[in-house]
Amino acid sequence: MTVKVLLTRDSVCMGDDCDAPHQQDATFDGATTLGDFVNRVAGYPLRMRGARWVMFLGWNRAEGSPIAEISPEWASPRFMAGADPLLPLASLAATDGDLSFFFQYHSGGVPLAGPPDPDPTALDPLASRLALWLAERR
């Protein structure tokens, strides 16, 4: 069985609104686990330093259930309490085999799922350039 997945996300600024709605369709094998799926789509939302994305099962955050939290600063997504990463996608899909996921944007702040990451994986290119510029001026 295959599962048709619709991904959509919040806009992060007025310029991003011009491209809304931010939809992407994909098809997955129904046996794909929720954990594998979340890891595969973790790059869908914009990868901005300090951004946190909460992934909801459902068309929007009002009707959906929070599944995971994603940040480009973390090595991997963090699953919310009660979300089982071993569930196959087919068990979450409606009878027609369709699933919708919504990504809600949060700027900075404390993660909703787990402690802050003590070792961020994403380097800040602006900070690196600023440090180099300052070093050259001395």
Image (spheres, helix red, strand yellow):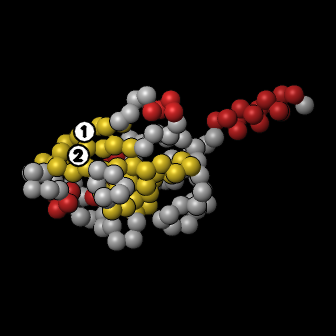
Q: Secondary structure at mark 2?
A: strand
State the image coordinates of residue 50 (x, y, percent, origin top left).
Answer: 58, 48
Q: Residue at x 54, y 41 (%)?
A: 48
Q: Residue at x 29, y 50 (%)?
A: 59
Residue 8 seen in the figure? yes
Q: Look at label 2 and name its amino acid.
A: Val
- The part of the image, by quadrant, that contains residue 123 is top right
Q: Indicate which disc residue 5 carries.
A: 2
Residue 36 seen in the figure? no
Q: Nearer the viewer, residue 70 or 102?
A: 102
State the image coordinates of residue 56 (x, y, percent, origin top left).
Answer: 35, 56
Q: Secondary structure at mark 1?
A: strand
State the image coordinates of residue 113 (x, y, percent, origin top left).
Answer: 48, 65
Query: From what the image shows, is residue 115 above or below residue 11?
Result: below
- Spatial separation of the CA atoms under disc 1 and disc 2: 6 Å
From the viewer's perspective, tell me whether residue 84 is left or right of residue 15: left
Give whichever of discs 1 and 2 has the lower sequence position. Answer: 2
Q: Nearer the viewer, residue 111 or 13?
A: 13
From the viewer's perspective, tell me whether residue 75 is left or right of residue 117: left
* Callout 1–callout 2 Cβ contact below 8 Å: yes
* CA neighbours of label 2 inside 10 A, class few (<14), some (14 to 19), many (20+): some
State the image coordinates of residue 28 (x, y, percent, origin top left).
Answer: 20, 46
Q: Residue at x 37, y 61 (%)?
A: 66
Q: Indicate which disc residue 25 carries.
A: 1
Q: Nearer the viewer, residue 91 or 99?
A: 99
Q: Residue at x 39, y 49 (%)?
A: 103
Q: Quadrant of the C terminus?
A: top right
From the viewer's perspective, tell me whether residue 71 is left or right of residue 24: right
* CA neighbours of label 1 inside 10 A, class few (<14), some (14 to 19), many (20+): few
Q: Indicate which disc residue 12 carries.
A: none
- The part of the image, by quadrant, that contains residue 55 is bottom left
Q: Look at label 1 and name its amino acid.
A: Asp
